[in-house]
Amino acid sequence: MAPYYQTAKSFADVSITEEGIDTDSFLNASDDFVNMFDLLGKGVFGFVQTDLRNNIAGVRERYNTAASTSTTLENLVKAEAHEHDRHGTACLVRLIRGLLFTCQALQNMQTDRASELHVCFKRSYDTHLKHHHTFIIRSVVSVAIRAVPHRHDFYNRITQGSPHEYFDEELAKWLVGLQNIVQRMKTFLEQGGYGKV
């Protein structure tokens, strides 16, 4: 049986057109990305997974109730801007923020092979999320980040027996796709006044 990361929807395969980022394929890739961390065991990335899953659900709820005006993430936000309740947009802003944090942490992991994962995640947290959190949340996240597995354990669990080098190549493709998406959405959301990532 193929390792999970070989069968999961990659952000590199999410369709991006002139209209924007395809909502359905983005949500599927987001689900598969978050589910990949289940391989590490309960609670290891729980603080990230819970936040991402809740925000994916909020965006999906908007997509399911207004599919014709939500075919792209950009269209979803524009259509919802004219409504009183902008729950889908708020969830999308937080989702992009969380994906940016995770993407940067995993890119740190790939470029700085001498550092343990908790160091890579801490760097990313300090850059992307820390300023959005209260002191109490920062303390909780600090403890959670210290529970991140060692690099070797992370690779062994995620690769499920396949060569680490192959996983690194695939992960790099995922992260390039994810980075393109989060940077595009960050610019769109902030320049349009829809939310600060």
Image (cartoon, grey):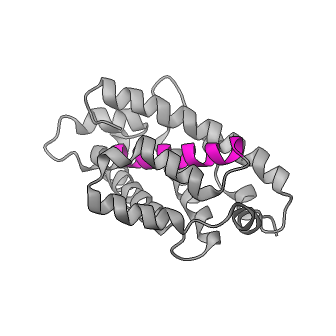
Please indicate whether residue 155 sits to the left or right of residue 134 in the image.
right
Q: Nearer the viewer, residue 102 or 82?
A: 102
Q: Residue at x 38, y 33 (%)?
A: 74
Q: Is residue 196 above or below residue 158?
A: above
Give x and y (percent) for residue 171: 70, 48
Q: Can you see residue 66?
A: no
Give x and y (percent) for residue 190: 32, 29
Give x and y (percent) for residue 100: 48, 43
Q: Which residues are magenta?
A: 92-112
Q: Can you see residue 109?
A: yes
Q: Residue at x 53, y 58 (%)?
A: 31
Count up the numbered dots.
0
- Residue pushed farthest left? 84
Q: Is residue 153 above or below residue 191?
A: below
Q: Nearer the viewer, residue 43 or 173?
A: 43
Q: Residue at x 44, y 67 (%)?
A: 143
Report if residue 123 lies within the magenta region.
Answer: no
Which quarter of the rendering shows the N terminus? bottom right
- Please name the predominant secondary structure of the magenta segment in the image: helix
- Residue pushed farthest right? 163
Which quarter of the rendering shows the C terminus? top left
Please indicate whether residue 92 sits to the left or right of residue 27 in the image.
left
Q: Nearer the viewer, residue 125 or 80?
A: 125
Give x and y (percent) for residue 56: 41, 55
Report if residue 98 lies within the magenta region.
Answer: yes
Q: Residue at x 32, y 23 (%)?
A: 191
Q: Quadrant of residue 160?
A: bottom right
